[in-house]
Image: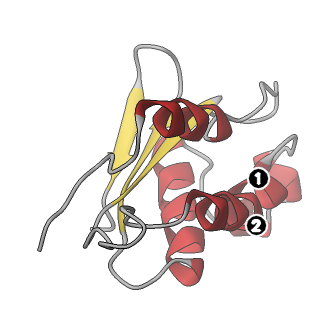
Amino acid sequence: MQQSKWPWSQLQRQWLSSILSLVESPTLVCQHFEVTVHGEIDPVTGMVMNLTDLKKHMEEAIMKPLDHKNLDLDVPYFTDTVSTTENVAVYIWENLQKLLPVGVLYKVKVYETDNNSVVYKGQ
């Protein structure tokens, strides 16, 4: 199986990077995150996954429930779970896993600051 973190062109990588950023919010623990997918590269499309589909899934699994929300008050998951950066990464992973094809999600990276981040690979 051929695997690639970025099976897309430079322009697609720049576009993907831009859609992966949360709007700055004083109530959100993190301000930026990255999602990495991997798997077989489709010989017809040249992609592991269509970016339009990935963007839709990210909107549903991440942006709608988290963007401009107070995690502790507005997100039911964090009622009984401490809203640390580590737990935000787990939350993102679990939500995306429900929407993406099996085995495609490789890594979620959540930045708390420019120098502090958490990587979660579903383990």
**Is 120 situated left or right of 15 in this image?**
left
Q: Residues within 10 Å of mark 1 (few under 14, many from 20)?
A: some
Give the x, y percent position of residue 51.
57, 57
- Left or right placement of residue 51 versus residue 35 in this view: right
Compared across the picture, whether 80 is left or right of 47 comes to right
Secondary structure found at label 2: helix
Residue labelled with disc 1: 63
Q: Is residue 115 above or below residue 66?
A: above
The local secondary structure at tag 1 comes to helix
Position of 90 with respect to 73 (left or right) is left
Depth order, front residue of 87/24:
24
Identify the residue shown where x is 23% and y is 54%.
Answer: 4
Residue that badge 2 annotates: 60
Identify the residue at the far left of this view: 1
Task: Tell me if label 1 and label 2 are in contact, CB under 8 Å.
Answer: yes
Q: CA distance from mark 1 to mark 2?
A: 6 Å
Q: Is residue 25 above or below residue 44?
A: above
Q: How far across and how far down the image is residue 29, in percent?
A: 66, 34
Quadrant assignment for the C terminus:
bottom left
Does 116 appear above or below 79?
above
Q: Nearer the viewer, residue 18 or 33?
A: 18
Residue 19 versus residue 44: which sits nearer the camera? 44
Residue 57: horizontal and vertical position, in percent? 66, 67
Residue 15 place in picture, x, y as percent: 60, 35
Report the residue at 74% width, 64% height from top: 79
Q: Quadrant of residue 62?
A: bottom right
Q: Nearer the viewer, residue 79 or 75?
A: 75
Residue at left offset 66%, top offset 60%? 52
Task: Please tell me which residue is depicted at 33% across the width and 46% down the height of the picture.
Answer: 6
* Quarter of the N terminus within the rendering: bottom left
Question: Could you tell me the amino acid type at mark 1?
Answer: Met
